[in-house]
Amino acid sequence: MTKFAERLNELRIEKGLNLKQLGEKVGISDVALGRWEKGTRIPNIESAAKLAKFFNVSTDYLIGVE
């Protein structure tokens, strides 16, 4: 699992959201979010930025750059 996948999963669980709920809040399909969490796909920069903003973290944190 990629660092992005791990962080996305951790942040989503911390907020108490399932994939569908998160998708509705950020305007991204739950299918895409699921693929990103499994590490089978990676998001484009726009989607990563939406998620970072929603979770109030930097995109660097989200992708694993410390």
Image (spheres, helix red, strand yellow):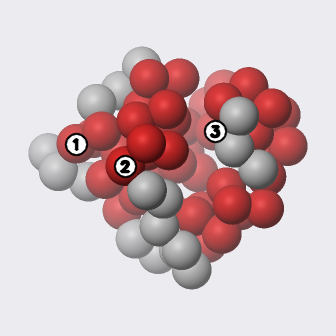
Q: What is the secondary structure assignment of the residue under circle 3?
A: helix
Circles 3 and 2, Cβ within 8 Å, touching? The answer is no
Q: Quadrant of residue 56?
A: top left
Q: Residue 65 vs residue 32: left or right?
A: left
| 53 shown above or below 60 | above
Element type at mark 1? helix
Residue 26 in view:
yes
**Vertical side of 63 occupied by 15: above or below:** above
Residue at the bottom extreme of this rendering: 40
Image position of 64 (left or right of 65): right
- Other residues around mark 3 within 10 Å, as few (<14) / some (14–19) / many (≥20): some
Q: Tell me the distance, in whole angstroms, between the alpha carbons under discs 1 and 3.
A: 17 Å
Q: Look at mark 2 in the image and give the residue it sits on.
A: 45
Q: Position of residue 23 (x, y in %)?
A: 75, 39
- The quadrant in which the C terminus is found is top left
Q: Give the foreground label among 1 and 3.
A: 1
Q: State whether residue 39 is above or below residue 26.
A: below
Residue that mark 1 sits on: 60
Q: Nearer the viewer, residue 3 or 58?
A: 58
Question: The residue under label 3 is which amino acid type?
Answer: Arg
Q: Quadrant of residue 57?
A: top left
Name the residue rendered at 59%, 51% in the picture: 9
